[in-house]
Amino acid sequence: MELNRKAQHLRTVFLKYLISIAIGLVLTIGLSILILEVFYQFGYIVPANYTENLLISEKSKITSADYFDKSMLPDNTNYIFVSKNGEIEESNMRNDIEKKAINFHNREGASNYPLSFMEIKRPEGYLIISYYLRPYYTNPWMESHLPQINTLYLIMLMVFCFIMIFVITVIYSRRLTKELRPILVASEKISEQNLDFKIGKTSIKEFNVVINGLEKMQVELSESLKKNWEEEENRKSQISALTHDIKTPLSIVRGNAELLNDTELTEEQETYTNFIIKNSNRISDYVSALMMMNKSNKFDNLDLEEIDISNVVNRIMEIAREITLAYNFTLLESINFDDGKLMVDIKSLERAIQNIFSNAIEYSPAESLIELKIFSTSGILNVIVLDSGPGFSKEDLVHGTKQFYRGDKSRHSSTNYGLGLFISNEIIEKHGGKLFLNNRSDAKGAEVRILMPYL
């Protein structure tokens, strides 16, 4: 997708946001002034010089009146009357303001804004009036309960500014969210590996750069998934071919073993032919299971049943003895477990155990020692298989239970397809257990530990 030439830079969007805020502030100040002007026009408040203008208009009347009467003074004023010899004859001012008024009369100080003074000369003396140059409410209740007009104006200005900034921020945030929507949708679909979609456009150049990157990621990920799918299909085909090819020689081996079993054999020969027949049947079961796994990649169809732990342990020991005997390995057993029951698919569990022993034998020196330890700890059955081989590499410990992992190719035969421990791990996990790979701490060799929970 090419960048939209009409798209704007992100800095332009933020500049517009700042300009909108500035215009909003100007409008807010204008609105606040307009509201105060309306209050002035309707007479709810009076301007700061209102009292001063009233005094000026009443000055001549106060000067020429036969007797001074404080009712001649406007509201919101105070006064002192000073005789010609400088004595205060009458006052309703506070002491601190009275001192300032005397200083004003004696020309020893000026008015202190917003406090102001006006002097009116009468025949019998001087009248000094104090008042404040600030706007007033015309309603006495409002004057006594509401903040001063200047303070009210500041509060109103701050509230309007906050509302204006909030509204403009919400508008721009919604616009940015709308512009980000194609990126968010694309990221979500890519994370879900849903790549069959078209990424939308935005009007911001920087966002379009990100969208271009997501489009490239979409294409590359789609090609990668397609390649992985093809490789997986190829692996499935190889497994299918392998399992199909195994069936014929396996049938020949089993058939000949059955024929041999019908002839006169020594007790030892009969034991070996029975081993061949039994394990041929197991291999046939494993091939069938491998074919099922190749279709679903999971062992989902386990036939779990409640079985005494003693029976499970006996089957594990039987498999261990058969496979070590067949390969001339020495088996050392350490068995000590608590009675109880397990939920198991015994055939699948046998398959897992046989794979673990096969792996141990493959990597151990010929005719060496294989150890089997079975014991109970806190309601868990522990099955441990220890070999005398080189042990697991660091890479083996991390990837050893993954499908088709083969580790160091120089350490195994070409017939190892990297399925043994993977299948064992899948089976154990389906039983609610865990399979761990470690290296022996007491000697050279590998350790495979299975943990199976009791019922």
Image (cartoon, rainbow, N blue to C red):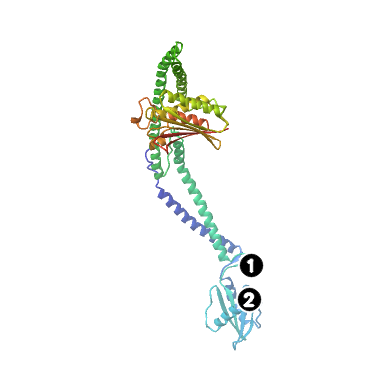
x and y percentages locating residue 277 in the rendered image: 46, 17
Q: Residues within 10 Å of mark 2 (few under 14, many from 20)?
A: some
115 lies above or below 40 = below
Whether residue 220 appears in this view of the structure is: yes
Looking at the image, which residue is at 39% across and 25% down?
234
Quarter that holds the C terminus: top right
Between 301 and 43, the residue placed more toward the observer is 301
Looking at the image, which residue is at 51% across and 49% down?
170
- Res 268 → quadrant: top left
Q: Which residue is mark 1?
A: 144
Q: Nearer the viewer, mark 1 or mark 2?
A: 1
Q: How many marks?
A: 2
Quarter that holds the N terminus: top left
- Marks 1 and 2 sit apart, C-alpha to C-alpha, by 20 Å
x and y percentages locating residue 42 in the rendered image: 61, 62
Badge 1 element: helix
Looking at the image, which residue is at 44% across and 41% down?
183
Q: Which residue is mark 2?
A: 73
x and y percentages locating residue 176 in the rendered image: 46, 46
| Residue sitting farthest toward the bottom | 85
Asked whether, in this view, residue 303 is left or right of residue 211, the answer is right
Residue 82: mark = none
x and y percentages locating residue 330 in the rendered image: 42, 28
Whether residue 403 appears in this view of the structure is: no
| Residue sitting farthest toward the left | 410
Between 180 and 275, the residue placed more toward the observer is 275
Badge 2 element: loop
Q: Earlier in the sequence, mark 1 or mark 2?
A: 2
Q: Are marks 1 and 2 in contact (CB under 8 Å)?
A: no
